Image (cartoon, helix red, strand yellow):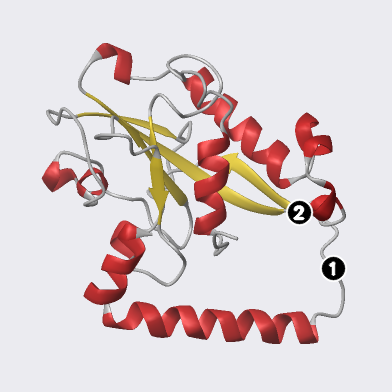
Amino acid sequence: MEVHHRQLEEEPGFRVAQQTLEHACQDMLRTAAAARTTPYKITVVVHVLHRLPAEKISAAQVKSQIKVLNADFRAKNTDRTKVPGVWSGLVADANVQFVLATKAPDGKPTTGIVFTATTATSFGSDERMKSAATGGANPWPTDRYLNMWVCTLKGGLLGYAQFPGGPAATDGVVIRNTAFGTSGSAAAPFNLGRTATHEVGHYLNLRHI
């Protein structure tokens, strides 16, 4: 929320874009003829920033995170039965599916995972990981890809996301490399992939209850 509030101050059009989106969503709810029967696919590119060997997480670790996202957003997570009773009736399949990109912006084949060496020892919430000029990696076109940056974060920061309507240059999700996925460098108690589930929820315009 710290990042969000800063962006609202720095980007005059962000607040208007958020309001426009809210109105558009309400209009869609009122006029939708029928619910989707097939999942809406979100193409993901994961930018792995690494200085040390341990920071260069494996493709298997990345795929374990995609698996968790799909389980959580399709209501296929095995722990959904633990939802408190007051909310149990709201558990539903969001009909959203996350897939790693198979085609890069230039049309060439890709695994959807981009490894980028950096000289930065860590990153904060100042968006530096999202630009090659500041030791990070530039986003792929944000109207076609969900950009996720996985890196070493300062302090206790586990991750953060940008709500819809913000600057394209910083659109996406950032996750600490030890809180990403369920294997490899993912460390307890943040080795369930739920940090990314939480932040992707913000990316999809969900607020803290």
User: Measured from the top left, where is residue 128 in percent x and y?
Assistant: 19, 47
- From the viewer's perspective, tell me whether residue 83 is left or right of residue 96: right
Q: Residue at x 55, y 59 (%)?
A: 208
Q: CA distance from mark 2 to mark 1?
A: 10 Å
Q: Is residue 77 visible?
A: no
Residue 203 pos. (x, y %): 50, 57
Please, is residue 64 above or below residue 203 in the view? Answer: above
- Residue 173 drawn above or below residue 11: above
Q: Give the mark nearer the N terminus: 2 vs 1.
A: 1
Relative side of 80 to 190, left or right: right
Quadrant of the image occupied by residue 79: top right
Which residue has dot 1 on it?
35
The answer to the question of whether label 2 and label 1 lie on touching residues, with beta carbons closer than 8 A, is yes
Amino acid type at image mark 2: Asn
- Residue 102: x and y in percent read 53, 38
Q: Quadrant location of residue 63?
A: top right
Q: Which residue is mark 2?
A: 95
Counting every numbered tag in the picture gives: 2
At mark 1, the secondary structure is loop
